[in-house]
Amino acid sequence: MTGVPARTDMHYRIGGIAETFMSTLLLILVKNQRIDLDWTIAKWFPGLLGADQVTFRMLVANTAGYIDYVTVKDFVDLQESQPFRAFTDDELINYSVRDGKMNFAPGTSQQYSHTDNVILGQAIERATGESIKELYNENLFVRSGMKDTYFPDNQNIRNPVLHAFSSERGVYEDCTYWNPSWGSTPGLPISNLADVGKWGPILGTGRLLTPELFREQIAPTSVGLGKNRPDAYFAFGFAVSNGWILQNPSINGYSGAFGYNMPNGVTITLETTKGVGSTDDDAAFEILREVVKYVTPNSPIAF
């Protein structure tokens, strides 16, 4: 908090870095024959727009076509005016599908969408009959020795806490305990720098997966769809650029950056929040971009 120096053992909301957890969990469930990537979600979402065409594979690759609810004005207005308000997954999904429209037909393009990720989290829970919290603990956190990483029950954060600050609502304020439920499954987990650092080589070498499933997780299948290129494309829950697995989360005043370089095994993880005069909402990733120029000068981040 104000006047208290930040330390590397402090806990914070990691936001979209947890999309790499969900991607890996999904493929573990595929490995264990509990889910098939090409199942449609209609069984668990009867009546949902596009559910008879959308598959688990499309959701994790963000090729399902659902409108991102964070681009819907009345959602944004409500979330900003009532930052402690709780949102259910059903509410979040409804903002996306209520008008009966999609960004594109399922599987025909690629565009990042929080909605795809919210539906994926719900689909995993409904298909397995277990909560994401249980599944993460059983399949990821315990196996990986990540004792400071957890899926929270509420908006509290385990001590010691790295506080977050924001000027989003026109006044500079501490936003550490704003309700993160609008981020749903992909945005809720909490960790610290040390544990996210542990996760780098676990994710980046496919340690919890078969070689075949890891190749599928990082494959350039989205190249040619949307804005994806061979040197910068979205894989299963993260971006890949010039050998780097990357995530650049932002949630409730926390700006993060995560990178794992597959050729040399280097992990870089950063977390920032806003100072009083800061105007940059993506500071951590800009720092990561500059650090990468030193670590792999011939392979910079290409987006």
Image (tube, grey):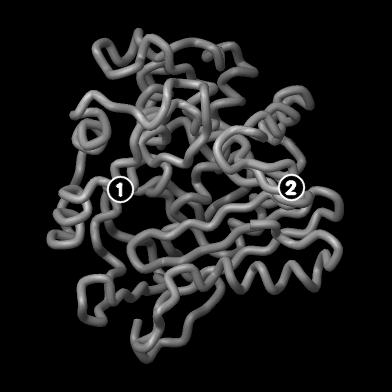
Indicate the quadrant containing the C terminus: top left, top right, bottom left or bottom right: bottom right
Viewer-proximal residue among 288 and 96:
96
Left or right of 76 in this view: 243: right
Label 2: few (<14), some (14–19) or many (≥20) C-alpha neighbours in 10 Å: some
52 w.r.t. 20: above or below: above
The residue singled out by tag 1 in the image is: 71
Q: Quadrant of the N terminus?
A: bottom left
Between the residue at mark 2 and the residue at mark 1, the CA separation in whole angstroms equals: 27 Å
In which image quadrant can residue 42 be found? top left
Left or right: residue 61 compared with residue 119: right
Locate residue 118: give its quadrant: top left
Residue at disc 1, secondary structure: helix
Q: Which residue is nearer to you in this view: 71 or 273?
A: 71
Q: Are marks 2 and 1 in contact (CB under 8 Å)?
A: no
| Residue found at x 47% / y 41% | 112
Disc 2 on helix, strand or loop?
Answer: loop
Residue 269, above or below 62: below
Provide the residue designation for mark 2. Answer: 231
Q: Amino acid at mark 1?
A: Thr
In the rendering, at what x and y percent does residue 79 appear? 19, 55
Which mark is on residue 303?
none
Q: Is residue 39 left or right of residue 187?
A: right
At x 13%, y 62%, the residue is: 81
At label 2, the amino acid type is Asp
Tell me the residue at 51%/63% (across/down).
256
Q: Position of residue 180 (x, y in %)?
A: 29, 53
Image point 43% across, 60% down: which residue? 250
Depth check: give the residue in front, 179 or 298.
298
| Image location (x, y in percent) of residue 136 | 49, 36
